[in-house]
Image: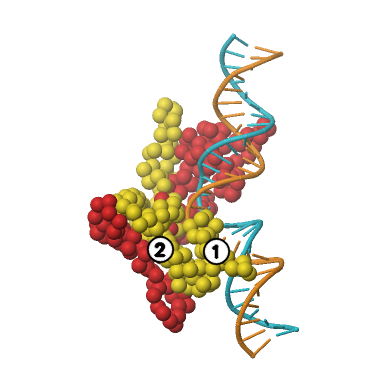
Chain colours: A yellow, B red, C cyan, D orange
DNA sequence: CTTGACCTTCCAGTTGGTGGAAGTCCTATC
DNA sequence: GATAGGACTTCCACCAACTGGAAGGTCAAG
């Protein structure tokens, strides 16, 4: 199979498949003309990877899962541990986003949106400056004051 | 104020502040020795940015919010629109993650974790290969089949 | 023989920074 | 005045996980 067929069958873009080869997740042999030749084994691995990625597993986790997938002697507790870790991360992320959502929802609700300059949202954003005249407690404690600051990034 | 003081007061690492200057979010003037000289205006902008980022606004959104923040004639409905868009994105993300969490929770629950090779999690991951013998419907529809595939990335 | 689809590699860009090296500057102490 | 230490400067590289595009080779059909 050529990369295009594999792409169609496993649902991953060809670019992504090449990338996965680059980082060593699959190793399709080459034909004489330089084209990659995919067999069923590689196709299955790619489908596996696509599904695992769609469940939000990181590439590192996918690597681990894949090697367990290919190991006839594997122990399902190893797999379960990875999945559990991932699940916990997701649940933590959900909590963070929910707290964020609540804060924002409140701000949006309080803003009239009546085309006037006064805006509770901007007020909130501007209000969060450390007004401690002395610098007693300023060993970057201000970074901890915002619980929401922790790795909220990347909402997309 | 030097960058270190500002960093302490607004809670952003100095590196980040330099980066924000790099991408044009702040423009502190320089002293003779080349050091950045921050006044209250720049400090306030940085604190504003820190808070907005901690609420998950993207840099692009921060840029827009910042220019509204500095615009005496601004209309709060512009601000509200940005916040609403962001809020909707967050809520969509939460839904996706909840669906993900449910799927994973179910898989984890079904896996005994008894150190034997049989594993429902791996079985699920492996099962998602398109088994359509014909390729009638294969114009990359397989990418749409997985609703969860959409931008779940980056759970951290 | 040409056209167009498909394949190849390589380079750059995305987001929002972070880490480190190399060099300059400031302040304090001896 | 010498020196040590911080704090500051720039620049380059790196993270994840791809994606886009350019430049070129290959293959099958008409």
Whether residue B50 is situated above or below residue A11 in the rendered picture = above
Let me know if residue B96 appears in the view. no
Q: Nearer the viewer, residue B102 or B114?
A: B114
Residue displayed at 42% across by 42% down: A128
Callouts 2 and 1 on one subunit: yes
Whether residue A17 is situated above or below residue B141 in the rendered picture = above
* Gap in angstroms between the C-alphas marked 2 and 1: 19 Å
Residue displayed at 66% across by 34% down: B34
Which chain letter goes with mark 2? A
Residue B53 coordinates in the image, percent (x, y): 45, 49
Q: Nearer the viewer, residue B108 or B57?
A: B108
Q: Earlier in the sequence, mark 2 or mark 1?
A: 1
Q: Nearer the viewer, residue A72 or B33?
A: A72
Q: Secondary structure at mark 2?
A: helix
Residue A71 coordinates in the image, percent (x, y): 38, 56
> Which residue is identified by label 1?
A29
Numbered badge on residue A48:
2
Whether residue B57 is situated above or below residue B40 in the rendered picture = below
Quarter the C terminus of chain A occupies: bottom left
Let me know if residue B146 appears in the view. yes
Residue displayed at 44% across by 34% down: A140
Q: Secondary structure at mark 1?
A: loop
Which chain letter goes with mark 1? A
Locate residue C1 relative to residue B72 in the image: left or right: right
Nearer to us of marks 2 and 1 is 1
CB under 8 Å between discs 2 and 1: no
Callout 1: 10 Å neighbours few (<14), some, many (20+)?
Answer: few
Residue B12 coordinates in the image, percent (x, y): 48, 40
Callout 2: 10 Å neighbours few (<14), some, many (20+)?
Answer: many
Q: Nearer the viewer, residue B81 or B97?
A: B97
Whether residue A34 is situated above or below residue B72 in the rendered picture = below
Residue displayed at 57% across by 37% down: B38
């Amino acid at each position: 199979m050529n990369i295009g067929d594999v792409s169609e069958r496993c649902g991953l873009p060809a670019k992504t498949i090449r990338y996965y080869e680059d980082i060593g997740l699959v190793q399709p042999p080459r034909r004489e003309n330089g084209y990659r030749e995919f067999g069923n084994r590689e196709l299955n691995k790619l489908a596996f990877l696509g599904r695992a990625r769609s469940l939000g597993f990181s590439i590192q986790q996918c690597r681990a899962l894949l090697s367990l997938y290919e190991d006839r002697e594997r122990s399902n507790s190893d797999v379960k541990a990875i999945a559990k870790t991932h699940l916990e991360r997701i649940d933590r992320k959900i909590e963070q986003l929910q707290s964020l959502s609540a804060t924002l929802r409140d701000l949006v609700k309080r803003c009239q949106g009546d085309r006037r300059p006064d805006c509770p949202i901007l007020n909130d954003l501007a209000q969060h400056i450390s007004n401690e005249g002395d610098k007693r407690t300023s060993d970057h404690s201000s970074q901890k004051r915002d619980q929401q600051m922790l790795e909220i990034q990347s909402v997309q």
